Amino acid sequence: MQLLTELKNLARKTPMGKRAIARKRIYSLVDFCRLSPEEIRQGEADPAKMQELVDRQVRKHTKIGKELNDRLDELETSPFLKAGTDVKSMRTKILFNYFAYGYTPNEYLVYDLEHISPEERAAYVSDRESVRYAYRFNDISSILLFRDKRATYKALQPYFHRQAIPIRSEADYERFLKYIRKHPVFVKKSAKESCGRGVELIDANGKNERELFEAIVSEGDVLLEERIAQSKALCAINASTVNTVRVQTMRTRDGIEIVWTFAKLGRAGFFIDNGAAGGLLAGIDMKTGIMNTDAVDEFGHQYKTHPDSGLVIKGFAYPDWEALISMCREMSASLPDAKWIGWDAAHTENGWVVVEGNGVTETIGPQSVYQTGVRRKLDELAKRTESLF
């Protein structure tokens, strides 16, 4: 077992090994259960063939098929669907688009794929396929760094501007006590989860310290962070949650470029603290820091004003914008093996702080707020970037 681990670690250090690992992960995360180009063409041209291909894939990949159909069952009765959306009649098309292009049911709805041509649909990049670009641009070591919140904190500590400690075993008990007595309200994050999973705001006041520690350790490796206190300027959006900004950077031969910037706006009952997933998205002009679109939710609804605060979204200007862009450029420069990074940041009274970095960043943000695919832009960037393959 130890020899196998050593061989894997060695492979990650060689160009051939990195390519092999990347291609294997791309297959398991992107291409597994995917239809061939010829099958896609046939399905797009013939509704009966589309149904046949969907039925075959659902039978062949029973776990995935069940998960998709369960999700569609939920959507059929969801009170949050846009008026006039008939998921039942769309079911075969939604399933086909998952097996053909990788689009999840929510992506199908948010991008309004029902009403655009196959050519327009192909211009979008599904969340699954964004993995392909991530492994093409980013060294496997940088992806693994971002997947471990403890390693991320260690590498980018100067930009967190808050204290965090890793917890994993009984040996950490005394350090845990010292930490929670200084920061009784803190955020617990599972070290290797993403998309807001494993994030919890904890108030240790009045709790049994030993029992609290044992409950946290039982969850595996975690990171404890000080709670982010966002600025009054950002509280105007929604004071009950941390409203973050996603800045995507790309290291090209011309330098570190800002690719997309968009807002992740909290909603009551959707966000936890320190950047958990959910809420609304809105576009931000990357040069000025001014929101330049209405907001959109995961069902495709548009919002001119924030549903909790009433704030008019388009035209809101983020403070200290140049400082945020500068910080993201600096962080990207410190990680030369990561070409394409999604940075989540929050604004406090003392300026911007990083919430986390994403070595496999997503494309649903820019595509949903601007309602246009980003494949052409990513392919253009790839021509100017030293990619793995």
Image (cartoon, rainbow, N blue to C red):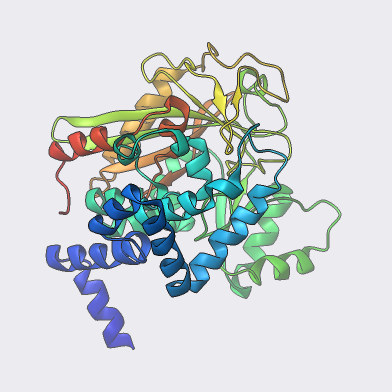
- Relative to 162, say whether 88 is above or below: below
Q: Quadrant of residue 327?
A: top left
Q: Residue at x 53, y 45 (%)?
A: 106
- Residue 15 in view here: yes
Depth check: 132 or 104 in front? Answer: 104
Q: Nearer the viewer, residue 222 or 72?
A: 72
- The answer to which quarter of the image holds residue 170 is bottom right
* Vertical position of residue 183 compared to residue 16: above or below: above
Whether residue 319 is situated above or below residue 62 in the rendered picture: above
Viewer-side residue, 370 vs 81? 81
Is 16 rendered above or below residue 82?
A: below
Q: Is residue 314 left or right of residue 84?
A: left
Q: Quadrant of residue 168?
A: bottom right
Compared across the picture, whether 25 is left or right of 200 comes to: left
Residue 258: image location, x then y, percent: 31, 28
In the rendered image, which quarter contains the N terminus? bottom left
| Residue 136 in the image, given as x and y percentages of width and height | 23, 52
